[in-house]
Structures are given as structure tokens and as C-alpha cells.
Image (cartoon, helix red, strand yellow):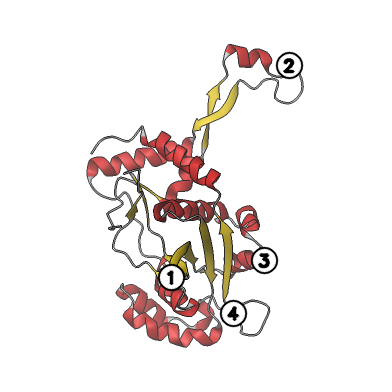
Amino acid sequence: MTPIKSIGNFSSSEIIALLSMGKIEMTPEELAARPKSGVGSAVKYKDGGLGTAAMTYIKQTNWERRAGRSMSQTSWSKETAWGKMLESRVFDILGGSYKRLDMDGSLLHPRIDYWTGTPDGEKYKLLEREKVAEVKCPFTLNSFFTFADCKDIAEVRDKHPDGEKYYWQCVSNGSMLGLDKAELIIYCPFEDELEDIVKDAQFAADIRTEKWIERCTSSELPYLIRNKSYNNIIVFDFDIPQADKDYLESRVIEAGKQLINI
């Protein structure tokens, strides 16, 4: 697949917005059948349709389509720079069964031309693509340890503030690649890795990242102590249910009906 620009399209990184549910007014028949006493007796709406977050995302995507430019005006941040710089290091540590997808742009969904994704990588088994791989390098130890205390992807979704977002990002990127398995990979370096990371910063794509890392002391960066309770890489390996792929696709299609033509 050839990378494309993601401007004016729904992307895997923000796809969770399309899962927000709105409220639909009940029909007279549904109102008559609702409970007449107790909790919920006054409710006149049912869940359904696109919620506020979805409608906001659709509106912003249409603005991009009209303007021909990204809505993003996010300034440089330590958190983003840290994650981008360490991604290649993670794939180096993981080894030969993994392939980093270092793309200039996003992949287009094979059937829906306004749905894009930028998977971090793929994992192979016997030379065949088996799993989509998403790498996250938390800049706070609070975030890393929250991941580390989870035993599986279900707990990540339940306990980490970004768990649902990352799960559906994996589902979306799995749909891009036609894969039904995923790995969410979390990395925090050991303290003795920081020296190499500072050296690697010389080759960072953004000069601001290089200068920032050069000025940092170890106490300003997240790190772990080797041979203690936590490993530097945590892998959450899971199947992507076809039902979740289908549900996400249905939400994207529903939202796509409100996109303007470009």
C-alpha cells in the first residue's frame, strides 16, 4: 500500500471519537413501553447515533477538507518528541520478527477512501505478516506503571486513561493491514540506556528534540532500574475480534455520510 496524506480523513489515532454515542428520542411506542416507576421512568431518550465527540471530529475533518490543511496546530512537546525518538529503538530491541513501518504519510483503508491509519509496525511469523504492532513510550512513570500493573489488554482498557484509545487504534490499523492480531508494546528505558539515548538524539529528525535531550539530566527523564520488578518492555498480545472490526467499520461509514466531497 502506498502512503497518503491523512488530511481530511478519519485516522486510527483519533478513531475512538467516532465511537461516542448520541441520544435518540424514543418513539411513542417506546415511551409507552418504558418503566413507569423507579429509576429511568422519566427517560425519553435512548442511546444511538453519533455522539458529541464524533460530531466534533466530523466537523473538524470537514474543515480540513475545505481548507486543504490539517487542523492540528500542536506545538512541539517533550512527550511527543520522546515517543517518536524511541520508536525505532524499540524495534531494534525487539529484533528480527518485527518490522517498523517508517512511512511518510498514512495507509488508506482497502475499501473506505476516507479512513486512514499509520501503524508503527508489523510482527511476522514464518515470513508472513501476523500482527499489527503499536508502540507507546510513556513520558510519565505513572503512565508506564499503570500499564505494567495490567495483566492483559482487558485491564489496559479498564485501568489506563488511554487504554480504550490505544485498543481501538490497534483495531483500526489492523483493518488497514488486513490483520486480526495485535500487540500493544510499552517501553520505558533502563537508567543505563539513557547514555545511548542521548547519543541517538543527535540523529533526531527535529533539532529541538536533539537540543532538549542533550540538556536533560537523568532525573528529568523516565527510566527504570535494571533487575528490579519491572522490565523495560511490556507486550500486550491480543486477538482483534471480527465483531469489533465490523462495529468500527459501521461507525466510520455512518460518520462518512456527513463528510463533504473533495
Secondary structure of residue under mark 2? loop
Which of labels 4 and 3 is toward the front? Answer: 3
Callout 1, which amino acid? Leu
Q: Tell me the residue at 65%/85% (across/down).
A: 227
| x 37%, y 80%: residue | 201
Q: Which mark is residue 226?
A: none
- For residue 224, the mark is 4
- Residue that numbered label 3 is attached to: 149
Q: Position of residue 9 (x, y in %)?
A: 33, 46
| Residue at the spot of label 1 | 127
Q: Secondary structure at mark 4?
A: loop
Q: Position of residue 181 (x, y in %)?
A: 52, 58
User: How many residues crowd around disc 4 within 10 Å: few (fewer than 14), some, or many (20 or more)?
Assistant: some
Pointer 3 or 1: first along the chain: 1
For the residues marked 1 and 4, what is the alpha-carbon distance in whole angstroms? 34 Å
Mark 3 or mark 4, which is nearer the start of the sequence? 3
List x then y, in percent, for residue 53.
Answer: 47, 40
Residue position marked by numbered label 2 in the rendering: 36
Q: Nearer the viewer, residue 73 or 163?
A: 163
Q: Which element is circle 1 on?
A: loop
Q: Are marks 4 and 3 in contact (CB under 8 Å)?
A: no
